[in-house]
C-alpha cells in the first residue's frame, strides 16, 4: 500500500496531467486513471484520501463509478469533475450523498487553477493521512485526552450585517491540534466523536470555551452574538436545554446572545426536536438552520420548527455572481427566509462581487473568507480595530 493521497479518474490525459500538477504544487501525491480498468486496478491497490471522478467517460460513466465506490464502502472524499451544467452535477452530487459517499467538491471544466487549488486543499488535505488504514486509530481515549489537555480549542469567524458592514456575531468552530499528528479537521473528529458516543463531552467543552470567551469580549467592550454548532445527537437529549441554560448562567451570558446552529440533516426527526427547540426559543436562545440547500428540510419543517435564521450553504453562495442557477437559489432562499420572518445569512462569501450581489438581494448577514477567516479568540479585537480604521479611511 503506497502513500498516495489522491486519485484522478478522467479520460482526458491533459486534464489528469493538469490536476496532478496542481495537486503536486499543493503537496499531494496523486495517481490518474484514464479508463475504468486502470481505475479499478489502482483503487484495489491503494487507499486514497480523495478521489476525483469525471462524470462522462467513453467506457464508463461517472455514476457507475460512484455506485462502484459506494458498494465497496469507500471512505475517501469524493470530488466530481464535470463540464456539464450545474443541475446535472447537482443530481450526481445528491446521488453520491444518498449512496453514503463523502461528497466534498466539484471541479468544473474549464478548470480554473486558483479554484482548483482551493478545492484540493479543502478536500484532499482534509483526508490526507486520515485514510482508515493509514490512520493510527483515534479512540475515545484520544478525544477525551485532547479535551482535558486543551488540544481542542475554538476558532471564531465573524459574521457581518450586509447593509452596514457592522460585526453582528461570530461562529465558534472547533479545532484539534494534535501534538504528533498536527491539526485534525472537524470534518474528521466531529463524526468520529458522534460514532464513539462522546459527542456530548465535546459539545459541553465547546460550549464552555465559547461562553467563557463571550464574557471576556463583553468585559472588553464588545458585545456580540456567539453561534455554536450542535450535533443532532446532543440536541436529541431531553436535558440539553437545561444544561445549556445552566452554562449561560454560569458564564453570565444573556441567552439572546447565544445561537445554536443545527445542520439541515439534523432536522430529520423534527418531532423530537420540536420539544427541545421550543424550550430554547422560550428562553430566548436563537436557533439557526445551517447548510441550507444541502439536505432535505421540507418547507413544512421550516414552518413548524422555530428557527430564527437560515444559513445558505456556501455551495450556492460561492458562484452566485456567475451562475444563474445559484443566483436563483440564493435569491429564493433569502425571500423564503424573509417571508417566514427569519434572518437570511450567506456563508462562504469569498469575493466582493458575491457580497455586492447579496446586498442587492437584501440578504441580511454574511460570513466568509472575504470578511474574515476563522481566527483565534485573541485576534478578534485586532480585526475589529483594523476594520474600523479601513472603513474610516
Ligand atoms: P459549518 O458549520 O458549515 O462551518 C463553516 C465551515 O466553512 C468552516 O469549516 C469554515 O472554516 C468554512 N468556511 C468559512 N468561510 C468560508 C469561505 O469563505 N470559503 C470556504 N471554502 N470555507 C469557508 P470548518 O471549521 O472546517 O468546519 C467544518 C464543519 O465542522 C462545520 O461546518 C460544522 O458543521 C462542523 N463543526 C465545526 N465545529 C464544530 C463543533 O464544535 N461542533 C459540531 N457539532 N460541529 C462542528
Ligand atoms: Ca455552522
Ligand atoms: Ca454551514
Image (cartoon, rainbow, N blue to C red):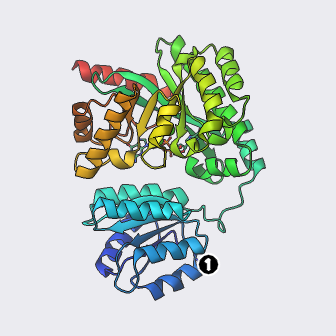
Local crowd size for mark 1, using a 10 Å CA cut-off: few (<14), some (14–19), many (≥20) = few
- From this viewpoint, is residue 3 visible? no
- From this viewpoint, is residue 362 visible? yes
User: In screen coordinates, is 140 left or right of 300?
Assistant: right
User: In screen coordinates, is 66 left or right of 359?
Assistant: right
**Residue 304 locus on image (x, y percent):** 52, 32
The residue to which callout 1 is attached is: 1
Q: Nearer the viewer, residue 127 or 197?
A: 197
Query: Is the residue 120 above or below the residue 348 in the image?
Result: below
Query: Is the residue 139 above or below the residue 363 in the image?
Result: below
User: In screen coordinates, is 286 left or right of 280?
Assistant: left
Residue at 39 percent of width and 26 percent of height? 383
Residue at 50 percent of width and 29 percent of height? 307
Q: Quadrant of residue 135?
A: bottom right
Numbered circles on residues, count: 1
Residue at 56 percent of width and 62 percent of height? 100
Element marked by disc 1: loop
Q: Which of 390 and 168 is in front in this view?
A: 168
Look at the image and tell me in which quarter the C terminus lies: top left
Residue at 52 percent of width and 14 percent of height? 218
Amino acid at each position: 500500500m503506497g502513500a498516495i493521497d489522491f486519485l484522478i479518474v478522467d479520460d482526458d490525459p491533459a486534464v489528469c496531467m493538469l490536476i496532478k500538477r496542481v495537486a503536486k504544487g499543493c503537496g499531494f501525491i496523486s495517481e490518474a486513471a484514464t479508463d475504468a480498468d486502470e481505475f479499478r486496478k489502482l483503487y484495489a491497490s491503494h487507499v486514497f484520501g480523495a478521489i476525483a471522478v469525471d462524470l462522462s467517460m467513453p467506457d464508463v460513466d461517472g455514476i457507475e463509478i460512484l455506485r462502484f465506490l459506494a458498494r465497496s464502502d469507500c471512505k475517501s472524499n469524493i470530488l466530481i469533475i464535470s463540464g456539464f451544467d450545474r443541475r446535472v452535477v447537482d443530481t450526481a452530487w445528491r446521488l453520491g450523498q444518498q449512496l453514503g459517499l463523502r461528497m466534498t467538491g466539484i471541479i468544473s471544466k474549464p478548470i480554473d487553477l486558483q479554484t482548483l487549488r482551493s478545492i484540493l486543499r479543502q478536500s484532499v488535505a482534509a483526508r490526507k493521512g486520515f485514510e482508515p488504514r493509514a490512520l493510527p486509530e483515534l479512540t475515545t481515549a484520544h478525544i477525551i485526552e485532547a479535551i482535558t489537555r486543551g488540544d481542542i480549542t475554538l476558532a471564531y469567524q465573524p459574521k457581518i450585517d450586509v447593509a452596514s458592514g457592522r460585526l453582528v456575531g461570530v461562529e465558534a468552530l472547533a479545532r484539534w491540534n494534535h501534538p504528533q499528528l498536527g491539526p485534525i479537521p472537524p470534518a474528521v473528529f466531529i463524526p468520529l466523536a458522534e460514532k464513539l458516543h462522546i459527542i456530548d463531552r465535546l459539545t459541553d467543552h465547546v460550549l464552555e470555551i465559547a461562553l467563557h470567551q463571550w464574557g471576556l469580549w463583553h468585559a472588553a467592550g464588545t458585545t456580540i452574538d456567539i453561534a455554536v454548532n450542535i450535533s443532532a445527537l446532543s440536541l436529541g437529549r431531553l436535558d440539553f436545554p437545561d444544561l445549556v441554560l445552566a452554562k449561560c448562567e454560569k458564564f453570565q451570558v444573556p441567552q439572546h446572545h447565544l445561537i445554536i446552529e443545527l445542520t439541515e440533516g439534523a432536522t430529520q426527526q423534527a418531532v423530537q426536536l420540536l420539544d427541545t427547540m421550543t424550550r430554547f426559543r422560550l428562553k430566548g436562545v436563537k436557533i439557526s438552520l445551517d447548510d441550507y440547500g444541502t439536505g432535505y428540510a421540507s418547507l413544512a419543517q421550516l414552518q413548524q420548527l422555530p428557527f430564527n435564521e437560515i444559513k445558505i450553504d456556501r455551495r450556492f453562495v460561492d458562484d452566485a455572481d456567475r451562475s444563474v442557477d445559484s443566483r436563483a437559489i440564493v435569491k429564493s432562499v433569502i425571500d423564503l427566509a424573509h417571508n417566514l420572518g427569519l434572518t437570511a445569512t450567506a456563508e462562504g462569501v469569498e469575493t466582493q462581487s458575491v457580497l455586492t450581489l447579496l446586498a442587492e438581494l437584501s440578504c441580511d448577514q454574511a460570513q466568509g473568507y472575504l470578511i474574515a477567516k476563522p481566527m483565534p479568540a485573541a485576534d478578534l479585537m485586532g480585526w475589529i480595530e483594523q476594520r474600523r480604521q479601513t472603513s474610516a479611511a
